[in-house]
Image (cartoon, rainbow, N blue to C red):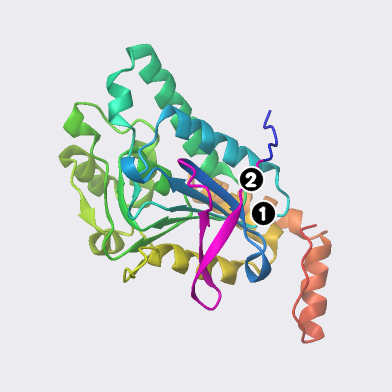
């Protein structure tokens, strides 16, 4: 059972230009910053990785923090879009914390990887859109986390790769499944077999990221672009978006006829909703719809 948990962070925002912000903790919290944005961004939830000295490498503690943060999003009916981003300049996430890993007995390694795989699957399965803002390197488990997102936006200086075979292991937190579903299976095999690290421009050509933006002086260009994209999602019907995501995610796993049946079932759930009626009324009255999510 997912438990809802509460935690307060004193936050201030650094204004980059109107309606573009990046959030910081006034007390530098090592690990993770969770925030529900307000104003024009109400409905957007952000999870910011904040282990700058370790390039946001995923430790046991950070994994626990991520799990609790995701639990909170699952419990939040007002959440409309989730953004994963970094507060560590030059890094989204360098993967697992290898210094910690070196001290783990085999059983603990297995438990950790299983827990990380479970977290990443839950990121993929959550009903709202998820955006990963890659403002730097995304390696191993960091790229696996990004692959679980619906949309990936990378800065021009970002680099990424599933590099586990260099360590005589393999991607174990979803990489062997998410990557070939994002690019072709042959491209996925090449990237995994060679442990190649690619730049964001190459990633865009492969379809691994949706957009590449020039990095800025504050090292948060991908995050700002993610906010802008999330803002364009907010006015649309939340139930329609959730059902569309469900139909796409389930449909790609089956044959076309079964996928169309899934689409039909998802569409049928939207017909009796008040939001659908509101959308039609707003269109006829030439006004913006007010969607309530039911």
Q: Which labelled disc corresponds to residue 34? A: none
Is residue 212 shown left or right of residue 289? left
The residue tagged 2 is: 73
Tell me if label 1 and label 2 are in contact, CB under 8 Å. Answer: yes
Q: Is residue 288 visible?
A: yes
- The span from disc 1 to disc 2 (Cα, nearest Å) is 7 Å
Q: Position of residue 79 (x, y in %)?
A: 67, 54
Q: Quadrant of the C terminus?
A: bottom right
Is residue 3 shown left or right of residue 280? left
Residue furthest to the front: 27
Q: Position of residue 237 (x, y in %)?
A: 70, 65
The residue tagged 1 is: 79
Q: Position of residue 36 (x, y in %)?
A: 63, 55
| Residue at 57% over, 60% down | 12
User: Please, what secondary structure does the residue beneath circle 1 have?
Assistant: loop
Is residue 104 shown left or right of residue 202? right
| Picture quadrant of residue 213 | bottom left
Frontmost residue, 283 versus 250: 283
| Residue at 69% over, 40% down | 6
| Residue at 46% over, 35% down | 62
Check disc 2: other Cα within 10 Å, few if <14, some if 14-19, many if 20+: many
Q: Is residue 265 magenta?
A: no
Q: Which residues are magenta?
A: 7-30
Is residue 56 shown left or right of residue 263? left
Residue 15 lies, with reference to residue 241, above or below; the image says below
User: Please, what secondary structure does the residue beneath circle 2 have?
Assistant: helix
Frontmost residue, 83 versus 267: 83
Q: Earlier in the sequence, mark 1 or mark 2?
A: 2
Q: Quadrant of the N terminus?
A: top right
């Amino acid at each position: 059972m997912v438990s809802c948990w509460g935690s307060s962070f004193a936050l201030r925002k650094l204004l980059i230009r109107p309606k573009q912000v990046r959030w910081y903790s006034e007390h530098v919290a090592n690990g993770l910053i969770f925030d529900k944005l307000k104003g024009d961004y109400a409905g957007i939830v952000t999870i910011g990785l904040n282990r700058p000295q370790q390039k946001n490498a995923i430790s046991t503690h950070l994994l626990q923090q991520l799990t609790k943060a995701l639990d909170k999003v699952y419990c939040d009916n007002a959440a409309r879009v989730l953004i994963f981003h970094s507060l560590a300049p030059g890094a989204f996430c360098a993967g697992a914390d290898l210094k910690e890993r070196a001290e783990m007995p085999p059983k603990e390694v297995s438990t950790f990887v299983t827990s990380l795989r479970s977290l990443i699957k839950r990121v993929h399965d959550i009903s709202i859109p998820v955006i990963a803002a890659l403002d730097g390197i995304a390696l191993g488990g960091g790229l696996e986390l990004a692959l679980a997102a619906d949309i990936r936006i990378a800065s021009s200086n970002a680099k990424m790769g599933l590099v586990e075979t260099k360590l005589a292991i393999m991607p174990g937190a979803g990489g062997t499944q998410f990557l070939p579903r994002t690019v072709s299976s042959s491209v996925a095999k090449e990237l995994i077999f060679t442990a190649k690290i690619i730049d964001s421009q190459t990633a865009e050509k492969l379809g691994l990221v949706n957009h590449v933006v020039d990095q800025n002086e504050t090292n948060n260009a991908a995050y700002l672009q993610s906010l802008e994209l999330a803002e364009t999602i907010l006015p649309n019907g939340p139930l329609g978006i959730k059902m569309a995501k469900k139909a796409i995610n389930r449909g790609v796993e089956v044959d076309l006829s079964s996928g169309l049946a899934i689409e039909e079932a998802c569409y049928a759930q939207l017909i009796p909703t008040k939001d659908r009626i509101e959308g039609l009324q707003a269109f006829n009255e030439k006004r913006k719809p007010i969607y309530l999510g039911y």
